[in-house]
Image (cartoon, coloured by chain):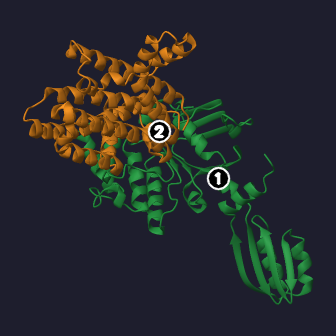
Amino acid sequence: MNDLAIKTVNLTKRYSGLWSKQPVEAVRNLNLEVHRGEIFGFLGPNGAGKTTTIKVLLGIIYPTDGEAYVLGQPAGDPKNHYRISYLPENPYFYDYMTGREILTFYAKLFGIGEPDRSKRVSELLDRVGLSRAADQPLRTYSKGMLQRIGLAQCLINDPELLILDEPTAGLDPIAHIDIRDMILDLRNQGKTLFISSHQLSDVERVCDRVAILNKGVMVQLGRIEELLAGGHVELIADKVPDNAVEPIRQLGGKVSLHDGRLIVEQPDNGSIDRVIDIVRAAGGHIISVKPYRRSLEDLFVETIQGGKDI
Amino acid sequence: MNATFAIAGATFGEAVRKRVLMVILLVALLILLISPAFEPFAGGRGARTLILSFGFGVIQLAGTFIAIIMCTGMIPTEIERRTIYTILSKPVQRYQFVLGKFLGAVSTLGFMYLMMGLVFLMASRLALGEFNPEIIRGLIMFFFQSSLLAAVVLFFSTFVSPLVNYFLSGGVFLLGNLLSSFLATIQRDPEVVPITRIPVQILTIILPNFANFNVQNPIINPEQVITDPTAYMVQTLSYAVVYMALLLVASMLIFNQREM
């Protein structure tokens, strides 16, 4: 388990209200392994059980069944919290405090004393680009600045594992790119990042592996490139005679021909070179050859919408 | 303890910036400042009795409102705003969070009582021409009464919503002020049957006795004689400390099991 940052074994969380007869199963038999040093995307529609899982990992709520381990220790052990950090979705910080004061507050929670505390706070303010706004109250901060201060409070203890819930939600494009770059920078420093997000393009760009949760059940897990394999190449050609269609069709792709315009969708591993040869030999004129990669969004939609009732 | 004090400091900082609490404090300060002007209404009771009982009344009322308003949302608001997640994901034990919140609340009350006490002392000095040590004693008693009420409110805030908490805490405060005298009355009455008396006796034991802190009673009713005021004060404050400790332990136990 030493190479694992997070491990859950048949993790189940049921909520049973005081008056409701039927308990709500937020997470069901979740088996998850996140390796140290990777960026792991934790995806799913609203209500899929992502935040519930994160809360169990942090010890904010307790599992109904199963086990959860963080950095080799049972989840929720406060001693383990010296090595992890968490940024919740849309975090609120005491807004009467300045950026410097809020980071000092969080540093005190770790028992970081002076002069290390002031030095660390100044370094972090600089790192997240808030040195100039350090002594302004948080209530004057924009959403992007608050997200940066949120990330700074995550780094106060130089954690091994960062759990980020929607780190780029609601940010303008510049702030969005900044936060994304900071995440990549953290990976380069060897940190493990566990990111729950609806920003699928970000996840696709930064994550090594992803898991998709739906209705509390994990429905996809794997490396991004493996999950997104299976794209196709589209070829468009003009002045293609009717007799060229049959040999192309035999190669296994989707073929359509109207008024001499040929459109072929050939699987990635299909023989697009053979199609080009056939078109040229028949006197056709190739207009374009374009590879289409499956996006994480495609996978997400297919997984969630195409999923059976769980 | 670093974390506990950090949470207490943040709680204090936030509370003293709450407009509603500041308005209550300012109104109380204003009334205390002009309290000598009510001297002509003293009638047969004397200016001293009027000014002291009136001033203590204002301080008690302000302290009660401040304790209830400040503490009802203390934990639910932290959960709603998700601030608590960034705190409990740090190496902070849940008991430290509850203790920090309570210490922050008590510090805020201490600050408010200091302000009100200074103005009350000044106003009574101007009106009566003397420095009255009863005021200091009264302020300490009411400060402990409000702190005990804050512990009650904080206890309820670990498991009920702020709205329910207002009613529960208000009810406990009211009963805690009335039950002991009610019990004394029904114990003197031979016609009261045990089925009526026993529940009152049980409630009187369980609920905090807020009436013991009401120092205006001997001022207004001089026939109530406290032979050793210092011993009475020590006893009452010890009662408050023990009761607060019990409430805090109960709050911590409940909060430890609470899912957020």
Residue A203 x, y percent position in the rendering:
58, 57
Residue A38 x, y percent position in the rendering:
54, 47
The amino acid sitting under disc 2 is Tyr
| Residue nearer the viewer, A206 or B188 | B188
Instruction: Tell me which residue sits at (70%, 39%) in the image.
Output: A25
The amino acid sitting under disc 1 is Asn
**Which residue is situated farthest in the front direction here?**
B44
Q: Circle 2 marks a residue in which chain?
A: B
Q: Quadrant of the N terminus of chain A?
A: top right
Question: In the drawing, does residue A160 fall left or right of residue A273?
Answer: left
Instruction: Tell me which residue sits at (58%, 32%) in the image.
Output: A62
Circle number at residue B166: 2
User: For the residue labelled by badge 2, is the local secondary structure a helix, a strand or a loop?
Assistant: helix
How far, Cα to Cα, is label 2 from label 1? 33 Å
Instruction: Tell me which residue sits at (26%, 39%) in the image.
Output: B112
Q: How many marks?
A: 2
Instruction: Tell me which residue sits at (64%, 54%) in the image.
Output: A224
Query: What tint does the image give chain A?
Result: green
Circle number at residue A46: 1
Residue A54 x, y percent position in the rendering:
56, 42
How would you rate the neighbour count of disc 1 (Cα within 10 Å): few for under 14, some for 14-19, many for 20 or more? few
Query: What tint does the image give chain B?
Result: orange
Q: Is residue A80 visible?
A: no
Question: In the drawing, does residue B50 fall left or right of residue A273?
Answer: left
